[in-house]
Amino acid sequence: MRGYKVFAGTANPEFAKRVAKHLSLPLSAAEIKRFSDGEISVQVSESVRGKDVFIIQSTCAPANINLMELLILTDALRRSSANSITAVVPYFGYARQDRKAAPRVPITAKLVANMMQTAGIDRVVTIDLHAGQIQGFFDIPVDNLYGSIVFNDYVKAKNLKNPIIASPDIGGVARARSFAKLLGVDMVIVDKRREKANESEVMNIIGDVSGKDVILVDDMIDTAGTIVKAAEVLKKRGATSVMACCTHAVLSGPAYERIAKGELDELVVTDTIPLKETSDRIKVLSVAPVFAEVIRRVYHNESVNGLFV
């Protein structure tokens, strides 16, 4: 057979090592350096001629550098006669700008999709895109995996007395409903709105959470403002405990401080983005085994959807 090789950028090297370990395959060698002015230099250190190549690289902060690394490494591999190039992008940056929500703004997720295809990427594997329609921005196959595959087992193992799923906003209802169906529990919605500019958000709970162990479900947690405020409101409405399952731990700005001081009992995230700090309230679950299995299935032309059925 042709054989395949796995390369990694510098965004999340520990995650790449975990994926390679599950594949029983060493990470292939590429030298990634910086010129004195900050420009990225890449040299592939081994032959990839005729090989199917997988690049593991999240486009998390610093997003511009990590994205450019992915594009430049792709170009180097394409010019080295790789048979195919699959970008394994656990966290897809710039996904929040996926439509024209106001006049004279870009659709940056589409721009990034164009750049990745132009560089020579043949396929993208990611998990919990901020908006599912981003898959349509590509004219190449996109496998959008589900973080629920690891959260589901973790939540079940906790044996919560009265679990209930909550969506932190209206936009996340489909994701929360899917998770609730997996667990066989009910769902509530946190309806948030801002009455006036520069005033704090008003949150209403659609559904009954009295005496319940609430599980907030979202694709990412950034500054943690919404999740922490939602936990406070849920407990005021009678929730026994509140945990949150968020695939991508962006955790920027005051996020760690808010989590430490807030009413959220536990935050469960995955390792798609490396944590800047550790916390007793943050539990990290690895999705490396999932990505490793997807890489294996893509190479052998097997069904990826079969993982989630």
Image (tube, helix red, strand yellow):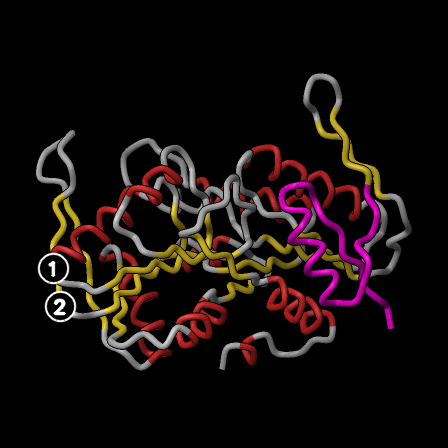
Q: Camera-side residue: 85 or 26?
A: 26
Q: Secondary structure at mark 2?
A: loop
Question: Dot 2 surroundings within 10 Å: few (below 14), some, or many (20 or more)?
Answer: some
Q: Camera-side residue: 9 or 71?
A: 9
Mark carried by residue 210 = 2
Q: Secondary structure at mark 1?
A: loop
Q: Can you say whether 253 is above or below 231 in the image?
A: above
Q: Position of residue 141 (x, y in %)?
A: 58, 63
162 lies left or right of 254? left
Question: Dot 1 surroundings within 10 Å: few (below 14), some, or many (20 or more)?
Answer: some
Q: Can you identify the residue that label 1 sits on? A: 237
Q: Residue furthest top?
A: 37
231 lies left or right of 245? left
Residue 83 magenta: no
> For the point 27% across and 56% down, which residue is it?
171
Give, as a single range, the part of the protein colored magenta: 1-30
Task: Give the number of callouts.
Answer: 2
Q: Write down the quadrant of residue 63 in the picture.
A: top right
172 lies left or right of 44? left
Q: Earlier in the sequence, mark 2 or mark 1?
A: 2
Going by the numbered disc 1, the residue's amino acid type is Arg
> For the point 32% across and 56% down, which residue is it?
265
Q: Camera-side residue: 187 or 211?
A: 211
Mark carried by residue 34 = none
Q: For the residues marked 2 and 1, what is the alpha-carbon distance in whole angstroms?
A: 6 Å
Going by the numbered disc 2, the residue's amino acid type is Ser
Q: Position of residue 68 (x, y in %)?
A: 64, 36
Q: Are marks 2 and 1 in contact (CB under 8 Å)?
A: yes
Q: Residue furthest left?
A: 195
> For the point 32% across and 74% down, which residue is it?
160
